[in-house]
Image (cartoon, rainbow, N blue to C red):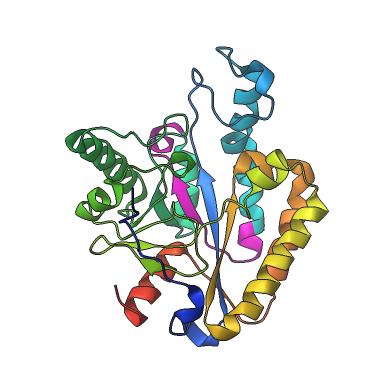
Amino acid sequence: MDNRLFDYSPIVERAPLHWPDGARVAFYVGLNVEHYRIDRPSTSTFPGTTHLTPDPLNYGWRDYGPRVGFWRLIKALDRHRIRASVLLNSDVADRYPQIIQAGRDRDWAWLAHGKNNSIFQPDVAPDEERAYLTEVVDTIEKATGKRPRGWMGPALTESFRTPELLAELGLSYVLDWTNDDQPYTLNVPGMLSVPYSVELNDIGLFVGKRLSGPDFVQIVKDQLDQLYEDAADGGRVMALALHPFVIGQAFRHRYLDEALTYVAEHPGVWLTTSDEIADHYVRTVGQ
């Protein structure tokens, strides 16, 4: 099957992309705020108990995020005046209203991230998928006071119809296709792909590769330094994907603060949100 969702576009053949105030790198934090069902296997730190219901070991590890890790994490974001781009499961709205209020108080950007992170984006009939997406988006709008403009599926899942259905609902970009350092237009009217990262992602680094806090700091520095160099030919996007139950662990907090200090104090970095990146791209490049 040929890919009809987007065209091949080598980055070396594009017109230079310019960020506000001459910045070379647009940086945003993709903050995953998620709900996990107690009766479904999900992201786990130990595979040996994932078949159990309940699975206190893995469920408790994930549940540390909304109970403790989130509240530690936002201290670092506040310290560096970074507004999060929240990848929000709609189930969070009813279950963790204090988190929603914390984000509203900080004027965070809200992106739809499916219903919960135990159920992936379904590949079902169009009307069924439309109803599912409508419920997710409407629930988030009601809770946050803002209609989401961006989407990332649970575990970055989509059907081939998802972008088109999201456009019908008024959304304008997705994060699921992690294949670029710049935004680009999809072959769906009104829809962009905005960069996200499965590599610069605390789950992959700490849980998958078992790296240390100092390793994390060095990786963030290396990513920014290389993107800054690349941006001599046009602006780049740096997305840092965070999960409160991972980066929010007490022994990792200092390393998140060190990494954000490096980014926030680096010249030529626009501290922004994925919404603002999409807006700027449409305004200056078009769709």
Residue 96 lies, in percent from the top left, at 47, 36
- What residue sits 62% from the left and 53% below the top? 199
Residue 51: quadrant of the picture: top right
Look at the picture and state if 131 lies above or below 193: above
Q: Is residue 55 left or right of residue 155?
A: right
Using the image as rendered, state which of residue 25 and residue 38 is in the foreground: 25
State yes or no: residue 84 in magenta. Answer: yes
Residue at point 30% right, 60% down? 172
Which residue is depicted at the point 22% across and 40% down?
130
**Residue 19 screen position, x and y as percent:** 48, 81
Relative height, residue 152 to residue 119 (above, below): below
Asked whether, in this view, residue 189 is left or right of residue 174, the answer is left
Residue 261 visible to the viewer: no
Q: Height in image: 27 above or below 207?
A: below
State the image coordinates of residue 233 (x, y, percent, origin top left).
55, 84
Tell me: 176 left or right of 270: left
- Residue at horizontal 42 percent and vertical 30 percent from the top: 119
Range covered by the magenta-colored residues: 77-95
Residue 193 x, y percent position in the rendering:
39, 61
